[in-house]
Image (cartoon, grey):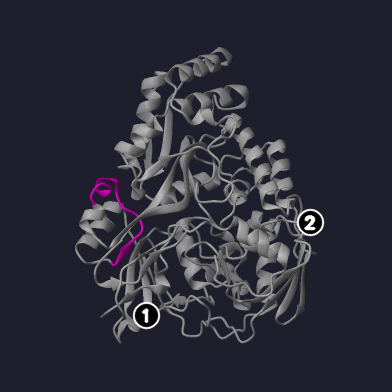
């Protein structure tokens, strides 16, 4: 996702190039900013972050939109998903297992602290340590010394060489390690953060293109206000004066504000407008492929969903869903029925994997599978899918549960929560007692990213607590491959097992559907569906 990459050895560079997205971004808008554009504030939609804004504990889109704006990592991803050096001067390796990372000198956090090698190493050690229970700890699993069983305060695989140099030793070669380094988990932290991380998370001090407008700029459940960080020197230097991310209760509300000229950019279109938004905003809208996968998860701990009975019921439910009809009628063709657990825009995607028939609508077989499960233990109770009402999910949840009800003859319905944070808290705390909507917006452009963080045993985003040693083995073997095709074959083989177990029920792939007002120019949506806010210009 970068236009350049300095000093990366051939093996890492080859992996990065092969795993990167083939072009999927679309530019939008035209015209030059006026002389006052640099001070103009861009307004956009968002959602209340689930947790305080600590990068190693932010693994959802509401918080990620903010942390990715106020922090700068070793690399960032350009519109097409290529890595570009940000804080990194060079990332070198000869064997895809031992890396020497040199950061640029003269970079600093917004409190004046210098960004050093220790800023990265200390933040990564904190994120990896078991006692700190960080949601993104899984991303450090490959570093030598990482443990799920005991607290390791300082990973032996991380060593500071000097003020601007550190080394990383992995437990084995990993083909996509360089690609991960633009993800939120790998951001640096200033020394000030460790005095009180909870307080820091409410008023974070970053080193990215934006910073909080003031102490208390995060108005919970209302908005967060960011302004340009004039000390940032990287490739994401803002062409505007700041960013107001407004937390809307519904997509309809944000779209209404856009139509009324009270909002500049939206990256989500409500179902009610999917068929009309491109006519409403001609030359100011986008409908493009994106690295987003949608699903719902049925934890094995729920009654009737453990063991062989659970596998049969998941397969029956999957085959009871008419994905083609729902994507056509509910989403006006802006979604594509899923054929796997990843995304069509990622290298290694395949529509022909063994077992993928379980994703096809098959009413008679669904009934047969459900009867087989009933023979193990007769069904009782109701089936529900929890979702956040502020995210525009009611229409498809109602359609999916109606399919399940009509095909399987059981009571099925949606279970709405008012906000994304509320449903995520119950999912994270494992207190939710129903199935729940899930999905994945890629952290970095690689097939493994759609699999390891979600289905690996103990992974940070493994919301259903799925565990299969055969899947774990294939994922590990895939990472160890330095040949991209060989790695992807391992990841595809892992998916064959996932089709049997269905730790999540794949639904469809999302396109990015967004729009913007004529008061802003140079709007472009990236490979992962997020607008490149720093490029947007606006006349005051």
Residue 413 appears in the picture as rendered: no
In the displayed structure, 406 sits above or below 482; it is: above
Q: Callout 1: few (<14), some (14-19), or many (20+) C-alpha neighbours within 10 Å?
A: many
* Segment tinted magenta in the rendering: 264-276
Numbered-mark total: 2
In the displayed structure, 112 sits above or below 191; it is: below
- Quadrant in which the N terminus is drawn: bottom right
Tell me residue 473's x, y (percent): 73, 41
Label 1: which residue? 241
Left/right of residue 97 with respect to residue 458 in the rendered view: right
Q: Compare residues 449 and 387 and report the one nearer the observer.
A: 449
Residue 34 placement: quadrant:
bottom left
Label 2: which residue? 171
Distance Cα–Cα, label 2 vs label 1? 44 Å
Left/right of residue 23 with respect to residue 484 in the rendered view: left
Residue 118 magenta: no
Residue 19 appears in the picture as rendered: yes
- Quadrant in which the C terminus is drawn: bottom left
Tell me residue 111's x, y (percent): 54, 83
Tell me residue 20's x, y (percent): 57, 58
| Secondary-structure class at tag 2 | loop
Q: What residue appears at the point 37 percent right and 27 percent down from the top-left corner?
A: 403
In the displayed structure, 395 sits above or below 234; it is: above
Tell me residue 285's x, y (percent): 30, 59
Q: What residue appears at the point 38 percent right and 37 percent down from the top-left corner?
A: 415
Left/right of residue 273 with respect to residue 86 in the rendered view: left
Q: Compare residues 516 and 11 and report the one nearer the observer.
A: 11
Indicate which disc, 2 or 1, sits on the residue closer to the N terminus: 2
């Amino acid at each position: 996702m970068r236009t350049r990459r300095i000093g990366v050895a051939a093996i890492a560079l080859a992996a990065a190039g092969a795993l990167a997205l083939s072009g999927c971004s679309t530019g939008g808008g035209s015209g030059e900013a006026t002389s006052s554009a640099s001070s103009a504030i861009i307004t956009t939609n968002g959602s209340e972050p689930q947790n305080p804004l600590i990068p190693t504990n932010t693994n959802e889109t509401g918080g990620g939109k903010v942390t990715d704006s106020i922090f700068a990592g070793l690399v960032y991803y350009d519109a097409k998903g290529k890595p570009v050096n940000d804080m990194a001067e060079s990332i070198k390796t000869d064997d895809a297992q031992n890396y020497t990372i040199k950061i640029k000198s003269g970079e600093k956090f917004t409190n004046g602290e210098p960004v050093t090698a220790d800023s990265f190493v200390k933040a990564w050690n904190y994120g990896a340590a078991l006692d700190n229970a960080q949601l993104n700890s899984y991303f450090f699993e490959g570093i030598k010394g990482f443990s799920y069983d005991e607290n390791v305060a300082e990973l032996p695989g991380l060593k500071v060489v000097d003020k601007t140099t550190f080394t990383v030793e992995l437990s084995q070669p990993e083909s996509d390690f360089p690609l991960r380094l633009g993800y939120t988990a790998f951001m640096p932290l200033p020394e000030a953060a460790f005095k009180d991380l909870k307080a820091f998370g409410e008023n974070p001090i970053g080193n990215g293109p934006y910073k909080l407008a003031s102490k208390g700029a995060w108005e919970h459940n209302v908005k967060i206000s960011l302004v340009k960080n004039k000390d940032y020197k990287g490739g994401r230097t803002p062409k505007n004066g700041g960013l107001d991310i407004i937390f809307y209760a519904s997509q309809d509300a944000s779209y209404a504000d856009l139509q009324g000229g009270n909002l500049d950019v939206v990256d989500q279109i409500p179902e009610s407008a999917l068929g009309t938004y491109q006519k409403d905003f001609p030359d100011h809208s986008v409908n493009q492929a994106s690295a987003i996968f949608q699903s719902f998860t049925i934890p094995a701990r729920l009654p009737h969903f453990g063991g062989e009975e659970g596998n049969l019921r998941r397969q029956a439910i999957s085959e009871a869903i008419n994905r083609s009809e729902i994507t056509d009628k509910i989403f006006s063709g802006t979604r594509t029925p899923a054929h796997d657990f990843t995304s069509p825009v990622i290298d290694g995607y395949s529509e022909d994997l063994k077992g993928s028939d379980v994703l096809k609508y098959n009413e008679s077989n669904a009934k047969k599978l459900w009867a087989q499960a009933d023979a193990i233990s007769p069904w009782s109770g109701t089936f529900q899918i929890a979702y956040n009402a502020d995210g525009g999910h009611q229409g498809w949840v109602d359609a999916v549960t109606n399919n399940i009800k009509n095909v399987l003859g059981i009571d099925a319905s949606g279970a709405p929560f008012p906000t994304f944070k509320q449903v995520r808290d119950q999912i994270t705390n494992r207190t939710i007692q129903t199935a729940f909507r899930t999905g994945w917006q890629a952290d970095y452009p690689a097939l493994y990213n759609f699999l390891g963080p979600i289905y690996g045993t103990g992974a940070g985003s493994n919301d259903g607590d799925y565990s299969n040693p055969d899947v774990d083995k294939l994922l590990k073997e895939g990472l160890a491959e330095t040949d991209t095709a060989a790695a992807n074959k391992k990841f595809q083989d892992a998916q064959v097992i996932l089709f049997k177990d269905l730790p999540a029920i794949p639904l469809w792939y999302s396109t990015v559907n967004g729009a913007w007002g004529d008061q802003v120019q140079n709007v472009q949506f990236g490979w992962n569906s997020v607008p490149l806010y720093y490029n947007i210009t606006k006349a005051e």
